[in-house]
Amino acid sequence: MLAFIPYLFACQGNQKEQAEPAVENKESSIDPQSLPPFNADSAYAFVAKQVSFGPRVPNSEGHAQCAAWMIALLKSFADTVIVQKADLKAFDGKVLHAKNIIASFNPQSETRIMLSAHWDTRPFADQDSKDQDKPIDGANDGASGVGILLEIARAYRIQKPSIGVDIILWDAEDYGQPADSKFPEMEDSYCLGSQYWAKNMHRPNYMAKWGILLDMCGALGASFSKEQQSVKFAGNLVDRTWQNAQTLGYSSIFLQEYGDPIIDDHYYINTLAHIPTIDIIHRTNSTRSGFGPYWHTHNDNMNSIDKNVLRAVGETVIYTVAQEK
Ligand code: AHN
Ligand code: ZN
């Protein structure tokens, strides 16, 4: 019985949130044909292009070249592009020269939605059995979410949203401390770019109504359960998004199940920036890590990418944003 007491207190603290959900429900009578056209072949090409630069590890040549390409591409699609630079200290003492890339549609609109993904890739393959010290391609862990967002930006260039949309590409997400690290333990060692942004927004007092984070959204065999931090901070948006996926015919990818909570960029966006944000992230019960079998290994390459998963996620996100107008 004692064990329940903290929970009761926690409940009282949450009563307001329960009475007034952070994100409202929406009726979903939208004709999918009327939406900005998400092209899965184009999204796939955007994933492949990122991978072609080599690993996008902060301070590397591939990182610099990929940033330049993404910035130029987003400038051709969005109304404004802001590059937020930051020097961020990693667990191993290295200073990462990071760039958060913020592309905005209708920058003057007060009603805003934030779509984001991390664009950097992991500097080592600590989950692999060989070449653990070599950086990974990050086709899924990094490039997939970015590829989907670049394609959404292309679609919005063709058919502009009626509200404000900010597409933010986080840097320095995946330089997190490995389990067997010799360095002193560092807290919050992942998600350095989003943590920096949440404490130093690109515009003072920036606010969005809600956000969607994409992480590992392109692998063959991927499915998405309702991640519990997302449920806690923006449960209505989770339900709405998963309902929209079902409406679009993607109920075999967006499962009506709950998945283990994860510390990802959305955690800091929720707790530091107070923007209700969900994470669409591939988790599974079939591996010990809870991530896909290629996670933080050299198998996270283009062979693991499935266009149909990119399409399911991209269309679902576009649909969910379109409900806001
Ligand atoms: C942790 O492992 C604590 N978070 C995972 C965040 C992540 C890494 N997403 C992609 N790679
Ligand atoms: Zn990762």
Image (tube, rainbow, N blue to C red):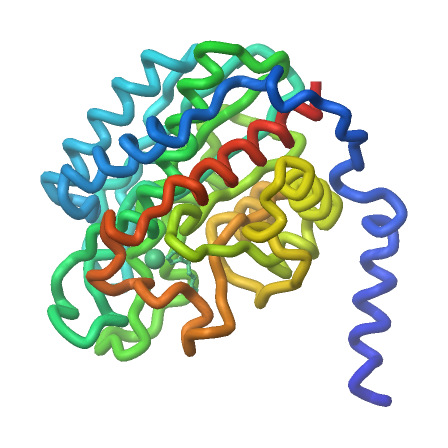
Can the viewer see residue 41? yes
Q: Residue 236's x, y, as percent?
A: 75, 45
Q: Nearer the viewer, residue 180 or 77?
A: 77
Can the viewer see residue 274? no
Quarter holding the C terminus is top right
Residue found farthest to the bottom: 1
Q: Residue 120's x, y, as percent?
A: 28, 45
Residue at coordinates 46% horizontally, 10% vertically from top-left?
158
Q: Nearer the viewer, residue 157 or 86?
A: 157
* Residue 232 figure quarter: bottom right
Residue at coordinates 53% horizontally, 11% vertically from top-left?
160
Residue at coordinates 38% horizontally, 40% vertically from top-left?
307
Examine the rendered structure and indicate whether residue 17 appears above or below residue 247: below
Q: Residue 285's x, y, as percent?
A: 51, 73
| Lateral position of residue 62 relative to residue 156, left or right | left
Examine the rendered structure and indicate whether residue 103 appears above or below residue 168: above
Examine the rendered structure and indicate whether residue 161 appears above or below residue 87: above
| Lateral position of residue 4 relative to residue 274, left or right | right
